[in-house]
């Protein structure tokens, strides 16, 4: 019967070497972790607690934590976050040691009223979303600035605040938090922010002249300028054949709504 003989001296040396190596590697791990550790920005942590945590990306950053760090490092402005209410922005300003004058909440509107009122130049057959349709000659509408009604913005909205009515996307003011996801999703760039207190908005984005608009859509702005002429507050100016409303002057009289021959200016 063969017996297994153990060289205890050799065994002890091997165990000793392994133990020394383990200690060396443990020390190296501790040193490297200390050298490579990302120091937590206390301001960023405090700011992140005041942000909504939606991670919608409306501010242009990857998420709320990334935006909080950018604020703490002076690379961003709190006004970029529309979903954050004014009282929270005030707290963030205090953390940053800055003054905050306040800003009115905004919501998004689709600057188009076309839909079934806008003529088609061909029958579109394909994926039922605006991005896909827009890739085919700018979509089926004669008007190049018309809402395609494919629901791309609706699918992207994190608050389920968009529906399609008569071929046009419509945003629910009471649900919209101004995150900006729909603004970036629209391939036609038809969605923009206006103050939540705004009484009216212009439902058209076409910069074409009158005859071109009339040939393409029955409710598009023809650039007649009547709204500018009748506005008692001087809150409307014509830019590129479209009325632009200065909401700081608009008092909500809705004279423009009543006088617009195309019903392009809509009441909210």
Image (tube, helix red, strand yellow):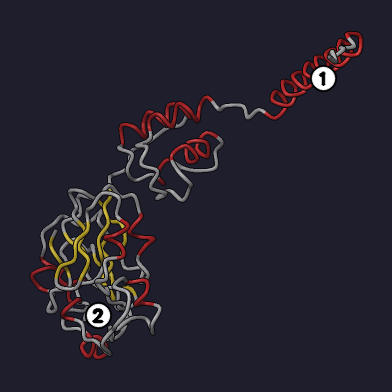
Give how far across and how far down residue 101 sits, in percent.
Answer: 36, 37
Disc 1 is placed on an element classified as helix
For the residues carrying marks 2 and 1, which lies nearer the camera in this image? 1
Marker disc for residue 21: 1
Residue 18 to residue 188: above or below? above
Q: Which residue is mark 2?
A: 223
Disc 2 is placed on an element classified as loop
Q: Viewed as shown, does residue 30 lie left or right of 160? A: right
At a point 74% along the width and 26% down the height, the residue shown is 32
Give how far across and how far down residue 18 sits, in percent.
Answer: 82, 18
At a point 12% along the width and 62% down the height, the residue shown is 267
Q: Residues within 10 Å of mark 1 (few under 14, many from 20)?
A: few
Could you say which quadrant of the image residue 73 lies in?
A: top right
Residue 66 to residue 225: above or below? above
Closer-to-camera residue (23/212): 23
Quadrant of the snapshot with the N terminus = top right
Quadrant of the snapshot with the C terminus = bottom left
């Amino acid at each position: 019967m063969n017996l297994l003989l153990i060289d205890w001296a050799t065994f002890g040396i091997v165990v000793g070497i392994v133990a020394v190596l383990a200690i060396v590697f443990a020390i190296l791990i501790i040193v490297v972790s200390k050298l490579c550790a990302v120091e937590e920005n206390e301001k960023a942590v405090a700011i992140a607690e005041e942000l909504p945590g939606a991670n919608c990306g409306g501010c242009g950053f990857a998420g709320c934590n990334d935006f909080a760090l950018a604020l703490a490092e002076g690379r961003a402005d709190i006004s970029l976050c529309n979903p954050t209410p004014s009282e929270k922005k005030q707290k963030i300003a205090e953390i940053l040691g800055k003054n905050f004058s306040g800003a009115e909440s905004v919501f998004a509107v689709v600057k188009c009223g076309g839909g079934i009122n806008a003529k088609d130049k061909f029958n579109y057959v394909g994926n039922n979303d605006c991005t896909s349709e827009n890739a085919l000659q700018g979509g089926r509408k004669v008007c190049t600035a018309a809402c395609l009604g494919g629901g791309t913005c609706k699918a992207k909205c994190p608050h389920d605040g968009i529906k399609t009515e008569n071929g046009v996307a419509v945003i629910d003011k009471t649900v919209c938090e101004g995150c900006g996801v729909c603004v970036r999703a629209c391939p036609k760039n038809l969605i923009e922010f206006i103050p939540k207190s705004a009484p009216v908005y212009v439902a058209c984005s076409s910069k074409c002249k009158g005859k071109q608009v009339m040939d393409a859509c029955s409710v598009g702005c023809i650039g007649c300028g009547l709204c500018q002429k009748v506005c008692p507050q001087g809150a409307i100016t014509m830019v590129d054949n479209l009325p632009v409303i200065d909401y700081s002057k608009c008092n909500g009289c809705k004279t423009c709504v009543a006088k617009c021959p195309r019903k392009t200016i809509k009441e909210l």
